Amino acid sequence: MQGSASLISSLLPLVVLFAIFYFLVIRPQQKQVKKHKEMIDALKKGDKVITNGGLICEVVKPEEDSIKVKLNDDGVIVKVSRDYISKKIDE
């Protein structure tokens, strides 16, 4: 009986530490990733976005693995990977 009690008392701090780590680090990060993916999937023509490089662009055509964006009023259109869209600008 003494052996099992000491085993439980030695593992309990590790379980508590993992639970705290999960609720303070892992779970919020998963929520943030899910929210970002939903934002990327909901982009449509005319939305303004900021890339990870800091470029402010207007979405021209969302595609399967990339997004065509217009950089300025001159009509310069480039393809940007969906991974590099940072956030949507709400005006």
Image (spheres, rainbow, N blue to C red):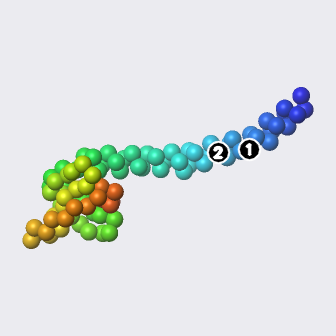
Residue at the spot of label 2: 18
Identify the residue at horizontal 47%, vertical 50% (top origin): 29
Q: Is residue 38 above or below residue 47?
A: above
Amino acid type, label 1: Pro
The image shows residue 40 at horizontal and vertical percentages of 29, 50
* Marker disc for residue 13: 1
Q: Earlier in the sequence, mark 2 or mark 1?
A: 1
Seen as rendered, the residue at the extreme right is 2
Work out whether residue 23 or residue 65 is closer to the camera in this orientation and state it: 65
The image shows residue 19 at horizontal and vertical percentages of 62, 42
Res 25 visible: yes
Identify the residue at horizontal 9%, vertical 71% (top origin): 74
Rendered-image quadrant of the C terminus:
bottom left
Q: Secondary structure at mark 2?
A: helix
Amino acid type, label 2: Phe
Neighbour tally class for label 2: few under 14, some 14-19, many 20 plus, Cα within 10 Å: few
